[in-house]
Image (cartoon, grey):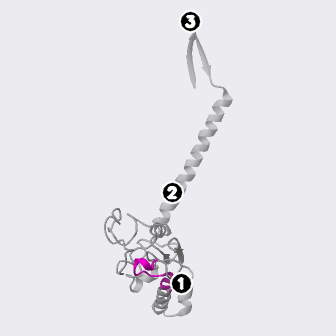
Amino acid sequence: FTFLTFSNQSLLFSTFSLSYRISVFREMARVCVMMMKILMMVVAIAMNMAMSEPIAPCYFIFGDSLVDSGNNNQLTSLARADYFPYGIDFPFGPTGRFCNGKTTVDVIAELLGFDDYITPYSQARGEDIMRGVNYASAAAGVREETGRQLGARITFAGQVANHVNTVSQVVNILGDENEAANYLSKCIYSIGLGSNDY
């Protein structure tokens, strides 16, 4: 930077010192490198999302209302989210998600490379289960009695029992227990519950 000053009718040039200009340049370079790293991470995530195959073959989700994607819709329960304003920002409207849009597991599924949301157990049929199943149920907890005051819900023990049923269906689809065990060992499992217990 150069500043012009007028003093005693002569033009004087005042400049920043060389060391200051070098420190400014280094700071600008550091910021540019940081921005490039962020850009590379964004590109890597976008490329991952554009993959034809997900990182894992299937994703199984256990939990409560924070990750429920519609399992309570057919239950006689006060813990339901199949009406507006739930889902107001979701492409399919109210689906049983206890939020206005995607849940955290929806975003995780996208980042894993799945091209669609993981199907809730109440709707999973046939080959759908090979991509994974969402067993989560609002009002569920680690304890069996959790959420009882809200009516029907799928307890954690019930979610595990539903998964056992899914595993037997995977065995039937693949035709062999060892092949099913190998396939299921490559899947991702998440559990998100406990906030309703106390």
124 or 25: nearer the viewer:
124
Q: Is residue 158 magenta?
A: yes
- First in sequence, mark 3 or 1: give its number: 3
Inspect this view and state whether residue 146 appears: yes
Which residue is rendered at x = 54% and y = 52% of the image? 38
Q: Which residue is mark 1?
A: 183
Q: Which residue is mark 3?
A: 9
129 vs 44, left or right, is left
- What span is in magenta? 147-160
Q: Dot 3, crowdedness within 10 Å: few (<14), some or many (≥20)?
A: few
- First in sequence, mark 1 or 2: give its number: 2
Q: Which residue is mark 2?
A: 42
Residue 137 circle label: none
Give the residue type that dot 1 points to.
Tyr
Spatial CA distance of label 3 from label 1 is 86 Å
* Residue 16 falls in image quadrant: top right
- First in sequence, mark 2 or 3: give its number: 3
Q: Dot 2, crowdedness within 10 Å: few (<14), some or many (≥20)?
A: few
Which residue is rendered at x = 62% and y = 39% of the image? 27
